[in-house]
Image (cartoon, rainbow, N blue to C red):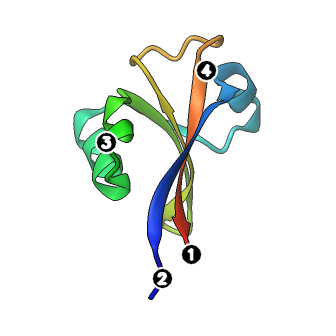
């Protein structure tokens, strides 16, 4: 049976660097944030107030968490991943 866990890579990138990519949506609405928190179900993920989300084929591609809801260019982002083993 496969084991699934959440892995967080702290200080993975910044808003400025991610903005160059163009494939991410900024999520700060309560209902959308709650859906992400429900997906990752990790105590540390609950500390994030907003996310940058890449959606691929109706599922999450990459997800970056951010403290606060104002995406200043200098803010650091943490990569949040579901890992299947």
Q: Which element carries disc 3, helix, strand or loop?
A: helix
- Expressed as whole percent of the image width and height from the top left, the position of residue 52 reads 52, 37
Per the rendering, the mark at residue 85 is 1
Quadrant in the picture for residue 55: bottom right
Between disc 1 and disc 4, the foreground one is 1
Q: Is mark 1 on a helix, strand or loop?
A: loop
Residue receiving disc 4? 76
Q: Gap between marks 3 and 1, in whole Å?
A: 20 Å
User: Are discs 2 and 3 less than 8 Å apart at CB?
Assistant: no
Q: Quadrant of the N terminus?
A: bottom left
Q: How far apart are marks 1 and 4 (CA)?
A: 28 Å
The Cα–Cα distance between marks 1 and 2, rounded to whole angstroms, is 5 Å
The C terminus: image quadrant = bottom right
Q: In this view, does 5 lie above or below 63?
A: below
Circle nearer the viewer, 4 or 3 = 3
Q: Nearer the viewer, residue 71 or 79?
A: 79
Q: Taking 14 as reference, is 21 above or below it?
A: below
Query: x%, y% of residue 33?
Result: 31, 40
**Which mark sits nearer the N-terminus, 1 or 4?**
4
Would you say 60 lies left or right of 15 here?
left
Which of the two discs, 3 and 1, labels the residue nearer the N terminus? 3
Specify which label sits upstream in the sequence, 1 or 2: 2
* Mark 4 vs mark 3, CA separation in Å: 19 Å
The residue carrying mark 3 is 43
Label 2 crowd bin: few (<14), some (14–19), many (20+), radius 10 Å:
few
Q: Which residue, given by chain and number where applicable, does mark 2 sit on?
A: 2
Q: Residue at x 46, y 75 (%)?
A: 3
Residue 80, how many percent across, how many down?
A: 53, 46
User: Mark 1 and 2 residues: CB-CB less than 8 Å, in contact?
Assistant: yes
């Amino acid at each position: 049976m496969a084991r699934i866990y959440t892995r967080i890579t702290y200080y993975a990138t910044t808003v400025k660097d991610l903005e160059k990519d163009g494939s991410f949506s900024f999520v700060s609405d309560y209902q959308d944030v709650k859906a992400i928190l429900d997906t990752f179900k990790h105590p540390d993920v609950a500390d994030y107030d907003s996310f940058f989300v890449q959606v691929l084929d109706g599922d999450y591609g990459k997800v970056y968490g951010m403290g606060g809801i104002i995406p200043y260019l200098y803010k650091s982002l943490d990569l949040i991943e579901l890992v299947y083993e």
